[in-house]
Image: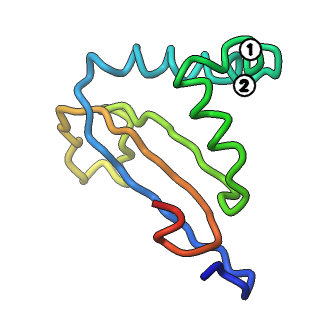
Amino acid sequence: MPNIDGKAYGFTAFTPMKRWKTPFLRLFFWSVPIISTRVIQKLFSWIPLVRAQQQLLDLSFIHFARWSIVKHDFWPRLSSLQPKDDTRYDYLMFCSNFNGTWQQYI
């Protein structure tokens, strides 16, 4: 059953990823606006990635979705007494807002 009360739900996930994957993912994120143009969508709709993006855009219950990369050395230190974080991985952060059921979203 869809969410008829007008409530939106938020979802955030952090996924560790190896550092060598970061440049490739940045290149992919850079190319998404180019893939989103209508001309590219019409000419290359036979490519699964282009077709999948169009299908995502057609989902009306997803209001916002964003992927971001958090570098391993970007975590904040709130004071000089706090030890410097020594993570080995970069992180892929995904944030989304949606209304509807969890089953629809997944």
Judged from this view, the residue extending furthest toward the bottom is: 5
Residue drawn at 25 percent across, 53 percent down: 81
Residue drawn at 57 percent across, 34 percent down: 52
Q: Position of residue 94 (x, y in %)?
A: 47, 48
Quarter of the view holding residue 34: top right
| Secondary structure of residue under mark 2 | loop
* Residue indicated by mark 2: 36
* Residue indicated by mark 1: 40
Label 2 Cα neighbours within 10 Å, binned few <14 / some 14-19 / many ≥20: some
Label 1 Cα neighbours within 10 Å, binned few <14 / some 14-19 / many ≥20: few
Quarter of the view holding residue 5: bottom right
Q: Where is residue 95 in the image (x, y as percent from the top left)?
A: 52, 53
Amino acid on which the number 1 mark rests in the picture: Ile
Say left or right for 15 vs 48. left
Q: Position of residue 66 (x, y in %)?
A: 57, 44
- Quarter of the image for the N terminus: give it: bottom right
